[in-house]
Image (spheres, coloured by chain):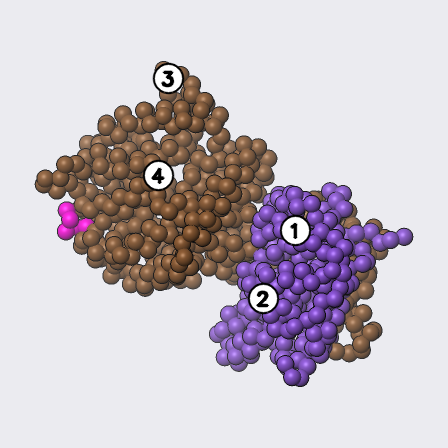
Chain colours: A brown, B purple
Amino acid sequence: MNPAAGSFESRAALALKDAPLQKALGNFKPLFVAKRASAVAELADFEALRERAAQIKNAVLAELDVWLERYAAAVEAAGGKVHFASDAAEAREIILGICRDANAKTICKGKSMVSEEIALNPALEAAGYEVVETDLGEYIIQLAQEPPSHIIAPAIHKTREQVADLFEAHHPGRPREESVAGLVNEARHVLREKFFRADVGITGGNFLIAETGSSVIVTNEGNGDLSQTLARVHIVTSGIERVLPTLDDLSVFLRILARSATGQDTECYTTISTGPRRAGDPDGPQEYHVVLVDNGRSKMLGGKFRDMLRCIRCGACMNHCPVYSAIGGHAYGWVYPGPMGAILTPLFNGIAEHYDLPNACTLNGRCQSVCPVKIPLTELIRTLRSEQVKAGLMPARQRTLLAAWGWVACQPGLYHALERFGSRLLRARAGRAGRIRALPGATAWTQGRDLPAPAGETFLEQWRKQRGEA
Amino acid sequence: MSESPRVGLFATCLMNVFRPNIGFSAVALLERAGCKVSVPMAQTCCGQPAWSAGDDDTARALARQVIDQFEGFDYVVAASGSCIGTLRKYPEMLATDPDWAPRALALAGKSHELLSFLADELKVNIDSAYPGRASYHDSCSGLRELGVKSQPRSLLREVKGLSLLEMDDAEVCCGFGGSFCVKYPAISEKMVDDKIRSLEATGADTLLGGDLGCLLNIAGRLKRKGSRIRVLHTAEVLAGRADGPAIGDEEPR
């Protein structure tokens, strides 16, 4: 499916009928939820770490300009170059410029959600570069020409058979592999040769360290390391909010990130890169660039959604979201799905264009209960709804109903009269059945559920009869 | 407590219309625990539907109405975690209103969900019996906004003849979510089906919960599927008022 096509509801409807997707989503619990729970339980002070992490982020965000200046100065001191991009187009231009200056032909990429956010691959490909995603999941969706459906497991929606089909079609001359191990091995062979050929390596930056000017990537495949070490030029793409003051601060985040994301104590590879290759270094790139992307973040910094800038992109919110678990990531229509996407996508791309995202949430709060940086996700989602109401975006029928209900609820006599009327009406329709199977005007409920019948007399009515006033 | 605490019962909209028995069960339990219970007759809604929809002004108007009617009591109690969760948000809703902010704070401080109030604040003697195998669904607002988790279970352990079976994912949303279930019915049905699968795997014959919205949703789907599992509010079982038809069940002829 083309993930951006159609409305949220039509994408969600397709997802609910997508059997391979539903099977993949069924694996979430053992894969992410159970593992996170045991990884967190093994740590005596996980709650304290969450609190500490949130505090560190809040302190940085309160003086983000200062920390960014310090970080940029440290990067330059280490021989690197920092580029600030105010939006996605500027970020793409900067990266295209670096690749042009490097006379690049092949570009290897480690996993980067910012690169998805700025739609980097299509721009690089249109400019004639060979672009290779080297994270296995990203590689799969690159072959399938799809956006990620999960921020840390981008191809989670693909079955083994679908991956085998893709590899068979894109790797001519190789026998079809069926097993997971065989497919991983095949990707390893294909990608290894690309790593050696790459002129430019582009990675994300899980964290940026102000005191040292370092970028930090955390991966399970080591592909990010090969991308950034073997190429002549290393470009880090990162959001401006990812800076941390010190390596000590980093240690707090390294303890919460893997546990929250995949339930591992630590990811397989944690790599801290500082500047280009120095004289005497055995390896490393000749050039080291950092492209810091704003793209709406500084606007968030000054408003009601600043807390969202604490996000470290671990994916715990979507792993624990029952709506995401029902419909998967593509239904959300952009690169960020789940609760964090329901907030970021409207903020980056428009609360009107993505009206449904904050609304398709039960405000159950499970996401924020696992968020390692304690982002009040449900409150932010509710605040987005409030912004939508203020902007006059609520559909007219719903707005009218809500306004009428609100007015009546402020008139107790009328409200109770309508409740008594409704109770009797529905009771009469149910008869002795105790439930109503079909109700005009309430088909959204009765299409899949019976409506349990009211008692016929409201509680307040009965109370008044039994006990009099008050 | 030396004197009988004066409790204002918040009669939630859904309870008032769909299941008055929950209200009478709450009153019975509170009175058994020594409370003097009143029901202000001019009360309507806590404002949750407006607040959740982002209609902040309507929610604030309803919050002020609730504060007006209930601030004279020692406690405000409702048999719903989500309505009490809303009362607890009044200080946030009215934070910028100097007249109402302190009153909102005072009201929020004495507002309690029924089951946690019975277990944490009062010492209620449960002497009811319910012959059955029940599973308890943790409604999200009660669980995550108010910390209601162990209290209903410890109260239910006092009920003679009742065995409590924990379901997998008891803490996962049932798909009700207020207007969510009618705005996105297909997603909601998938969620309630997941809930029902967990429930049925326990072999329970009864589903209990603490919030009628969730119970209407789960019962509605169970009955549509022809299930015989009975759905009741925990208060009905604790008060010994669970012998009539359960939620969505046929009346005896």
Q: Position of residue A460 (x, y in %)?
A: 76, 70
- In the displayed structure, A322 sits above or below A230; it is below
Specify the segment rendered in magenta: A75-79
Residue under the point 69% across and 54% down: B163
- Point out the residue furthest to the bottom here: B3
On screen, residue A333 versus residue B122, left or right, reads left
Q: Where does label 4 land, which residue?
A: A220
Q: Earlier in the sequence, mark 3 or mark 4?
A: 3
Q: Position of residue B239 (x, y in %)?
A: 74, 65
Q: Where does label 1 land, which residue?
A: B165
- Of tags 2 and 3, the one toward the viewer is 3
Label 3 Cα crowd, 10 Å radius (few <14 / some 14-19 / many 20+): few
Q: Are circles 4 and 2 on residues that touch, CB within 8 Å?
A: no
Residue under the point 47% across and 28% down: A160
On screen, residue A183 versus residue B252, left or right, reads left
- In the displayed structure, A7 sits above or below A183; it is below
- Point out the residue furthest to the left here: A279
A402 magenta-colored? no
> The residue marked by circle 4 belongs to what chain?
A
Q: Where does label 3 land, which residue?
A: A174
Quarter that holds the C terminus of chain A: bottom right
For mark 2, give the secondary structure.
Answer: helix
Between the residue at mark 4 and the residue at mark 2, the CA separation in whole angstroms equals 43 Å
Question: Residues at marks 1 and 3, common chain?
Answer: no
Between the residue at mark 1 and the residue at mark 3, the CA separation in whole angstroms equals 53 Å
